[in-house]
Image (spheres, rainbow, N blue to C red):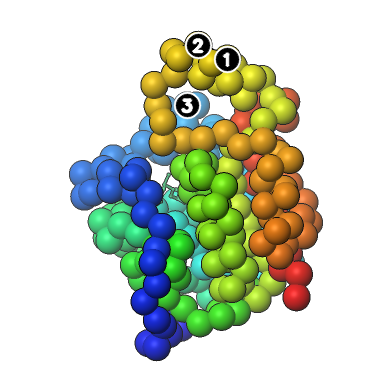
């Protein structure tokens, strides 16, 4: 799986990436298991992902990138035939995932540390690149294109990707607070649907389908893309 001959190239570095140290990794694992709303949100995310995997043709090899604390490893393992690779920029996130997820799940996952902009695998390595909750951290058009082109190189067939899009109440409210300067967080970005869909096309993908977390209200959208050969 790992291409030993991969060549060094300049790799995009995101400022938010540094925050995933050991302490943050453990916090991130627990965060998604706490409270009614978090649990409901995780349940809904899993529902969208099951649909997305179905649309992607139930891929037999998946690269979960970034895998974070392994939130979706048990879901991805539901298909017993599936080979699961999992990577993250932060070695602390990978360590947290391995130590906190059940052993019967982790023993089937092949993990490695990698930037999503420079994935250390050969071309067409997997059937599906599975990228949840990374793209909304990428504010620059050129950086998103770079990421998508790298996914295009690594997938044989599909990509499942989630991000924040416009065209809903939360996006409208966010734009309002951004325009009045009352918005403080600057490491998560909202992208217009027309921009991201043009970027998918420019990187060599067709959109097979998308699923909205809560149509017309929430910003989260999960796209299923197919590589144009
Ligand atoms: C919000 S978490 C999402 C993790 C997981 N997909 C989930 O939904 O639970 C973002 C993850 O992106 C990872 N990350 C940050 N920059 C990255 C990069 N350039 N390449 C790969 N992973 C990165 C972080 O270490 C962190 O685990």
- Element on which disc 2 rests: helix
- Element on which disc 3 rests: helix
- The residue shown at (56%, 73%) is 154
Seen from the viewer's position, the closer of residues 125 and 108 is 125
Q: Which label sits on residue 75?
A: none
Instruction: Name the front one of labels 3 and 2.
Output: 2
**Mark closest to the chain's N terminus, 3 or 2:** 3
- Tell me if label 2 and label 1 are in contact, CB under 8 Å: yes
In the rendered image, the vertical position of residue 8 relative to residue 224, given as above or below: below
Q: Residues within 10 Å of mark 3 (few under 14, many from 20)?
A: few
- Measured as percent of width and height from the top left, residue 30 is found at 33, 40
- Measured as percent of width and height from the top left, residue 197 is found at 72, 48
Q: Which label sits on residue 180?
A: 2
Q: Which label sits on residue 176?
A: 1
Seen from the viewer's position, the closer of residues 151 and 98 is 151
- Measured as percent of width and height from the top left, residue 138 is found at 49, 45
In the rendered image, the vertical position of residue 172 relative to residue 75, given as above or below: above
- Tell me if label 3 and label 1 are in contact, CB under 8 Å: no
Quadrant for residue 13, please give it: bottom left
Is 95 left or right of 144, judged from the image as shown?
A: left
- Measured as percent of width and height from the top left, residue 73 is found at 47, 59
Is 22 left or right of 113, judged from the image as shown?
A: left
Is 101 left or right of 183, judged from the image as shown?
A: left
Mark 1 Cβ and ligand 1 under 8 Å apart: no
**Mark closest to the chain's N terminus, 3 or 1:** 3
Q: Which label sits on residue 36?
A: 3
Quadrant for residue 168, please give it: top right
Can see residue 77?
A: no
In the rendered image, the vertical position of residue 1 relative to residue 145, given as above or below: below
- Tell me if label 3 and label 2 are in contact, CB under 8 Å: no
């Amino acid at each position: 799986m790992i291409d030993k001959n991969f060549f060094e190239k300049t790799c995009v570095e995101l400022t938010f990436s540094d925050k995933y140290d050991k302490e943050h990794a453990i916090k991130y694992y627990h965060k998604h298991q706490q409270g009614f709303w978090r649990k409901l949100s995780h349940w809904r995310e899993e529902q969208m992902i099951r649909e997305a995997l179905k649309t992607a043709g139930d891929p037999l090899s998946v690269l979960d990138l970034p895998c974070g604390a392994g939130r979706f490893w048990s879901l991805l393992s539901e298909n017993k035939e599936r080979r699961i690779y999992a990577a993250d920029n932060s070695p602390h996130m990978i360590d947290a995932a391995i130590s906190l997820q059940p052993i019967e799940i982790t023993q089937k996952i092949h993990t490695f540390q990698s930037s999503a902009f420079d994935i250390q695998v050969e071309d067409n390595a997997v059937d599906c690149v599975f990228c949840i909750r990374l793209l909304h951290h990428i504010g620059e058009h050129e950086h998103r294109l770079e990421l998508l082109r790298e996914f295009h190189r690594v997938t044989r067939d599909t990509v499942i990707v989630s991000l924040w899009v416009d065209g809903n109440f939360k996006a409208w409210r966010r734009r309002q607070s951004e325009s009045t300067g009352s918005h403080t967080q600057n490491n998560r970005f909202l992208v217009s649907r027309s921009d991201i869909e043009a970027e998918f096309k420019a990187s060599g993908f067709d959109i097979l389908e998308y699923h909205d977390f809560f149509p017309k209200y929430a910003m989260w959208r999960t796209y299923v893309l197919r590589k144009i050969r």
